[in-house]
Amino acid sequence: MDIQKRLQYCSDKLQPQFRYRWMATFVLACFYALRVYLYGYCILTFFLGMCISTLVMFLLSSRIDPDLLVSSDAPSILPTKASDELRPFVPFLPEFEFWCIVNKILCVALCLTFIPILNLPGIWYVHKGT
């Protein structure tokens, strides 16, 4: 229980530090990019990109799709008049959780670059027999 309290305390302290959190993530991503540039790991980088692009989709999508809440015969609940209430955008994945997951994925990918068996080339050339 003490560990959970410490993690929550650190999380609460980090959450308002937007600029410093993302600068640290940028440094981590640059270190990963340097490892990939020097040693390869193209397939690992491809999967890292797929994971991050999926997370970006979750970050940019709404938690609730208002058109799915009503039937096709009923009018849309999106505001169509000036008097209609406009609801704020609530993302499916909050920014802080997005940052946490991206850092976890980058750390795992960075650790995997130290395992030589995972250094698979991105393109295998077809060797034609003579």
Image: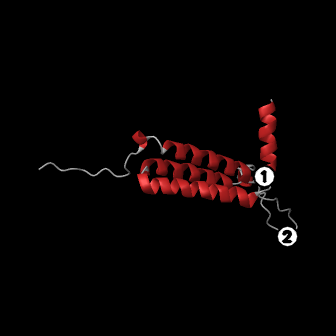
- Between residue 91 and residue 126, name the one nearer to us: 126
**Three-letter code for the amino acid on which mark 2 is drawn:** Ala
Q: Is residue 52 above or below residue 115?
A: below
What colour scheme does the image use? secondary structure
Q: Is 42 on the left or on the right of 5, as rendered?
A: left
For residue 33, say whether it is visible: yes
Q: Is residue 71 above or below residue 83?
A: above
Q: Secondary structure at mark 1?
A: loop
How far across and how far down the image is residue 71, in percent? Answer: 73, 49
User: How far is disc 2 from disc 1 in space, using C-alphas?
Assistant: 35 Å
Quarter of the picture containing the N terminus is top right
How far across and how far down the image is residue 33, in percent? Answer: 51, 56
Q: How many marks?
A: 2
For residue 73, say whether it is visible: no
Which residue occupies 56% across, 58% down? Answer: 30
Residue that label 1 marks: 15
How far across and how far down the image is residue 40, in percent? Answer: 41, 52
**Three-letter code for the amino acid on which mark 1 is drawn:** Gln
Q: Is 23 on the left or on the right of 31, as rendered?
A: right
In the orientation shown, which residue stands out farthest toward the bottom? 82
Q: Secondary structure at mark 2?
A: loop
Residue that label 2 marks: 82
